[in-house]
Image (cartoon, rainbow, N blue to C red):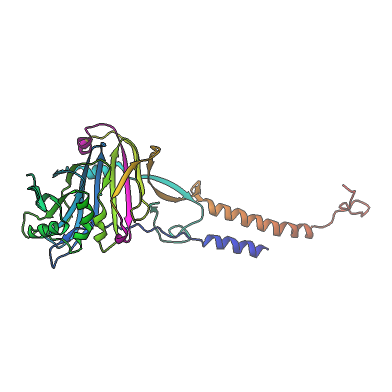
Amino acid sequence: MKRRVLSLLFALLATQLGSLISPAYACGCGAMIPEEAYRIGVDRESSVVRWDGRSEEIVMRFTVGGDARRAAWIMPVPGRATVELGNPALFPQLTELTRPERKTRTYFWPRDRDWPFSSGSGDREVGAAPGAGAPVGVVGRERLGDFDVARLTATDPEALRTWLEANGFKMPDRLAPELKPYVEQKWEYVAVRLAPREQDRSLRGELDPLRIRFDSARFVYPMRLSRLARTPQSLGLYVLGDHRTEPASAIGGAAPEVTFAGKITPDGALGELTGGKPVFLTAIDQGFPDPSRIDGDLELRATARDTPFRRAVYHDELLTAGGVPVWLLTVGGVVAAVAAGTVLPAVRRRRPARSDDRGIPLDLPGRG
């Protein structure tokens, strides 16, 4: 029995927990194409979106790598758009506001970094008026920092693709069929060519954010063109509004994950965007493992309740009492109890029998 108890204790001591793996981010824009013979990788696409019931505003920022010096992408919008450079301080401010809360939690059994083990880690973490009748109309074209921006209308998806390529916006051959639903709905387009002013400079690091405004009768984030992507995609949205917000459907991606939700009173760059008024901020991440399954644009809606939420990053610590691991005190107590249960009966069996002056045993029943 004693051996079985000790074997169980040591089996429990050997139990270890596996580590969590953090997901990598990719671009949520499937229509970003570099110049030929070069490559571009979008490490992260972040967007701030807000809608007042009539008009929508999107501030987008890309973090890119690779050796491409030119690239282009196109964004369909449901109404006439204006485009300008956004405030670069906006996204660092949002990152700080939505930073996970750091908490400490204790565990009982030792892990690989604790005695009698040796190594391991502790922290884990549980997006000019056009000519009449023309297939493609140029609403406006301007240079904004490293961006060449064209605002367009189109009545023919193939003519739109031809215009883009003729004007330095290299686009994939598969673009025209994907543009057809937008042409049929009479959407307009913001075509962006990333072209640094320094001719030999590659597109690397964080690009300047673009601020796009357009009229819209519904709260929508254009996503359909991400079907063109050939690798898994992810989208990160900061949604500003009167209430907590959620996607109306997954549109062919993984289940959206809320990473922050709460009422804020913005200042700085965020205050410039909201006019300094209190707003509800919802941060949403969504992955698209198979972009070809994307079946529409991402529509957003208010949730039934404005439940606040903040992620937590836990720092795990071994449970101790007075600086001594509790597991060691517990094991020591159990071992002592097992030993006592084995030794004391043997001592009692070896103890000499007591008797009175006449030699009669005192331990007989009825004798005191």
Q: Residue at x 70, y 57 (%)?
A: 341
Looking at the rendered image, the quarter that the N terminus falls into is bottom right
Front residue (pair 116, 260) = 260
> How far from the left and from the top, in percent, is residue 160?
13, 56
Left or right: 119, with 297 as reference point: right
Q: Residue at x 89, y 48 (%)?
A: 367
| Magenta residue check for 231 | no
> How far from the left and from the top, in percent, is residue 2?
66, 62
Front residue (pair 219, 9) = 219
Front residue (pair 39, 155) = 155
Magenta highlight range: 268-295
* Residue 146 shows in this picture: no
- Marker count (numbered): 0
> How far from the left and from the top, in percent, is residue 114?
45, 57
Direction right: furthest residue = 358
Direction bottom: furthest residue = 37
Left or right: 15, with 41 as reference point: right
Picture quadrant where residue 343 is located: bottom right
Front residue (pair 229, 153) = 153
Picture quadrant where residue 24 is located: bottom left
> How far from the left and from the top, in percent, is residue 355?
88, 53
| Magenta residue check for 291 | yes
Direction top: furthest residue = 277
* Residue 309 shows in this picture: yes
In the depicted structure, whether residue 215 falls above or below residue 355: above
Left or right: 322, with 339 as reference point: left
